[in-house]
């Protein structure tokens, strides 16, 4: 498979969030603000790319029985790098993301890509696959966050857009709307596909 | 912040439900909730593991990681503790209670990667709970998760044969139901709030 195909497959046609319903914990939790979603997405891209690369590099040497454990430890090491980086340079964002940075470890997308792709392919391809899956995930996050922040706070990336006349929909900032937004997104994406086939 | 452990226990079930307000443990929540019995089994396993690992992680964090000044390793340590505990539970169950092992055993490996378990450990550190508060929070969160997955499994069973738009079948519908449940739980939030 060509490098570009690997990227588009994992980013769009096999997008983890809407095709496989993986990794939605954080997709729901951080999407009340665009900035948080973007930072979270970048963290996931970084972790996915490098953990894919590392796992693929040592895939011949990992004993089958403890495969999961080794993968989790590799992923956790990269998440610690992300966490320390955020704490050092962007303490405010790190604080508002709270435990969700650490929870990248148990994000099913990363384990899923490690199992499905990195364990069977060469390092460079695995890295491209990881970046692709991460970009697809980030796009979904930003899409949901766009609607939630625009209607919930009347702003985008913290910059006021809608002005004073806008009555803020506080439900958009609260938990239930996250479920509804993701459901609607999956609905919209699934509908034409099923009509065609 | 001094909150009664009892209050934290109830708040973790209702007002700050780990699933409906913090969105943790969604993966297994959506995939297992097809049947009431397996939901019950997974829910009980989660409650048990959550309660015990929050206690162990509390001790490990405050008596090992803090004195040695290696807090930055907390993610790795927590996940090892959880994985090791799940493995241990599996072996003990298999040895002493085959019956329980067959009803809960298949769910145990799923739990290691359930983000709610790690989430509870991380939340209790961030919120600076005491030992008793941490255990109450772990138990409450587990029960809250059990409650949510049981409710979803019950509702899904009822509407299994009803007409829904084809694009919504499966995950989309479950998410909408969960959203409505979350709305209902927002109604509890006037009682007590924990951050």
Image (cartoon, rainbow, N blue to C red):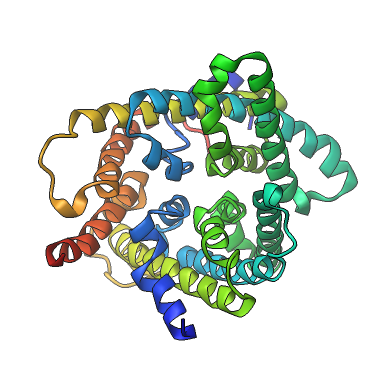
Using the rendered view, name the quadrant where residue B173 is placed.
top left
A132 relative to B134, above or below = below
* Residue for point 21% across, 47% down: B169
Left or right side of A138 for A128: right
A51 relative to B56, above or below = below
Using the rendered view, name the quadrant where residue B182 is placed.
top left
* Residue for point 25% across, 33% down: B156
Quarter of the image where the C terminus of chain A is located: bottom left
The reply to whether residue B20 is in sight is: no
Give the number of marks. 0
Q: Position of residue A97 (x, y in %)?
A: 55, 56
The reply to whether residue B174 is in sight is: yes
Q: Nearer the viewer, residue A124 or B69?
A: A124
B111 relative to A129, above or below = above
* Residue for point 22% across, 60% down: A190
Left or right side of A5 for B151: left
Q: Position of residue B134 (x, y in %)?
A: 65, 29
**View extreme (left): residue:** B163
Q: Position of residue A192 (x, y in %)?
A: 16, 66
Using the rendered view, name the quadrant where residue B175 is placed.
top left
* Residue for point 61% across, 28% down: B49
Q: Nearer the viewer, residue B123 or A46?
A: A46
Q: Position of residue B103 (x, y in %)?
A: 49, 21
């Amino acid at each position: 498979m060509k490098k570009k195909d690997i990227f588009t497959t994992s980013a769009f046609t096999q997008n983890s969030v809407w095709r496989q319903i993986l990794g939605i914990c954080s997709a729901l939790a951080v999407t009340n603000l665009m900035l948080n979603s973007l930072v979270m997405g970048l963290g996931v891209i970084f972790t996915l790319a490098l953990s894919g690369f590392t796992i693929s590099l040592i895939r011949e040497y990992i004993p089958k029985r403890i495969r999961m454990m080794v993968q989790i430890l590799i992923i956790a090491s990269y998440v610690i790098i992300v966490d320390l980086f955020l704490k050092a340079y962007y303490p405010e964002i790190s604080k508002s993301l709270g435990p969700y940075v650490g929870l990248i470890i148990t994000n099913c997308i990363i384990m899923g890509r490690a199992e499905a792709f990195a364990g069977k392919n060469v390092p460079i391809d695995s890295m491209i696959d990881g970046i692709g899956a991460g970009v697809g995930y980030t796009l979904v996050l930003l899409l949901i966050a766009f609607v939630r922040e625009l209607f919930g706070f009347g702003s985008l990336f913290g910059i006021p857009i809608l002005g004073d006349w806008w009555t803020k929909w506080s439900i958009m900032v609260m938990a239930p709307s996250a479920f509804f937004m993701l459901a609607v997104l999956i609905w919209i994406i699934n509908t034409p596909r099923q009509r065609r086939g | 912040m001094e909150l009664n452990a009892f209050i934290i226990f109830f708040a973790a079930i209702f007002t700050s439900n780990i699933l409906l307000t913090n969105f943790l443990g969604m993966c297994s929540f959506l995939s297992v909730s097809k049947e009431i019995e397996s939901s019950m089994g997974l829910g009980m396993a989660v409650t048990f593991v959550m309660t015990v690992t929050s206690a162990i992680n509390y001790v490990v964090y405050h008596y090992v990681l803090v004195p040695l000044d290696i807090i930055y390793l907390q993610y790795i340590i927590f996940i090892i503790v959880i994985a090791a505990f799940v493995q241990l539970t599996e072996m003990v169950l298999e040895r002493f209670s085959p019956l329980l092992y067959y009803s809960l055993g298949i769910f145990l490996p799923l739990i290691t990667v359930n983000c709610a378990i790690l989430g509870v450990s991380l939340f209790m550190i961030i919120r600076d709970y005491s030992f008793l508060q941490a255990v109450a929070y772990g138990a409450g969160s587990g029960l809250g998760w059990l409650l949510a997955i049981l409710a979803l499994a019950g509702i899904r069973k009822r509407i299994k044969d009803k007409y829904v738009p084809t694009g919504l079948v499966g995950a989309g519908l479950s998410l909408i139901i969960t959203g409505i449940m979350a709305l209902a739980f927002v109604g509890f939030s006037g009682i007590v709030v924990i951050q």
